[in-house]
Amino acid sequence: MLSAILVMAGIGLVLGGVLGWAAIKYRVADDPLVEKIDAILPQTQCGQCGFPGCKPYAEAIAKGDADINLCPPGGEEGAKRLAELLGVEAKPLGEGLEPKPKSVAVIDDQTCIGCTLCIQACPVDAIVGAAKQLHVIVASQCTGCELCLPPCPVDCIRMEVVKEDLASWKWRYPIHAMRRVA
Amino acid sequence: MENYLLILIATVFVNNIVMSKILGLCPFLGVSRKLETAIGMGAATTFVLTLGSGASSLIDTYLLGQDLAYLRTLSFIVVIAGIVGFTEMFIKKTSPVLFRVLGIYLPLITTNCAVLGIPLLNVQEQHNFVESLFYGLGGSLGFTLVLVLFAAMRERLEAADVPKPFKGISIAMVTAGLMSLAFMGFAGLIK
């Protein structure tokens, strides 16, 4: 009986020691703040803030390199929640980043030359097409980030405001949750 | 040496832990959706299982013996959980990508019955320390082999024209059954 207790206690002690040592030796500098900021950001990965996605922007905010008012899809509401989380003054969205009405990109099929440049620019893979084939935008996936506009050599992409009806109406924030595809 | 080689071949092919002992089915079906995850899971399990098998054998021989044999399951689980915890920290530090890919399945190695099953089989077959190591290594290599093969097949099944009622997990089950049948072909290779 006593030996059983001693054996189990001994195993526990040794393992506890090893794990404690490993916890110090293999510590990963994890910033929980980044996760919290990332959770507030709308995850459109649109890049309008100047960072390649929501996570890098969250990291920049956490480090203090970026302001909290650079996210148009998040809007005033998002900036306000970020301000609450970080304990700073809320401020209106930055210059040229005013929230626009929700819109989707539409490709003019008369002009599109099938160059695939917009496909490479799309952060959410919402453009379908192949070289020298007409490209089409999957409206349900499009986040309206306008990143496909600048690379188009023939300016055949335009933004169309989505009219609000019963099917497309959403709560104001978050704008629309990203669907996990893969 | 020949003995160890026989143990390896026997555990990888003939007495495959998944296909003939029906252990470790949870990760077999859970992590076999993609080839990369399967390889990562196989590698992590191989590491844990080989270490766990050796450590359990040492504990059984030197700490427990015949008097405390009733502590086997308990102490084996504790040791395996410790090794898994260590592996988790190690992978998190060395390969964050693999850590994210494995996700919940990494701590779930603890509850992978193959990982507890092999040390218990070691005791049953009265293997010594080195034999236990090889048995653990062979068992986990067999597990990895089956997992990787199965994942490769499931990746192809995704694209295949499967009848609607069979889509998803049902065709995976059918495939697993056929694979198990195929592994029966190795029976009689050794012993």
Image (cartoon, grey):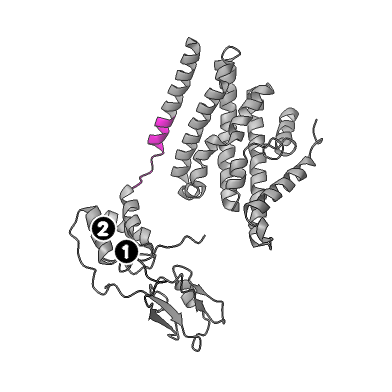
Chain to which the residue tagged by mark 1 belongs: A
Quarter holding residue A134: bottom right
Q: Does residue A67 show up?
A: no
Q: Which residues are magenta?
A: A19-31
Q: Position of residue B160 (x, y in %)?
A: 68, 62
Residue at left offset 73%, top offset 33%: B5
Residue found at the far right of this picture:
B188
The answer to whether residue B181 is seen in the rendering is: yes
Choose between A58 and A98: the one closer to the eye.
A98
For disc 2, the marked residue is A82
**Crowding at label 1, few (<14), some or many (≥20) Cα neighbours within 10 Å?**
some
Which amino acid, by three-letter code, is at mark 2? Answer: Leu
Residue at 51%, 78% in the rendered image? A136
User: Which x, y percent locates residue B47?
Assistant: 56, 37
Rendered view: B172 above or below A20? below
Give the left or right position of residue B158, taking residue B7 as reference: left
Residue carrying label 1? A173
Figure label count: 2
For marks 1 and 2 on the same chain, the one whose residue lies earlier in the sequence? 2
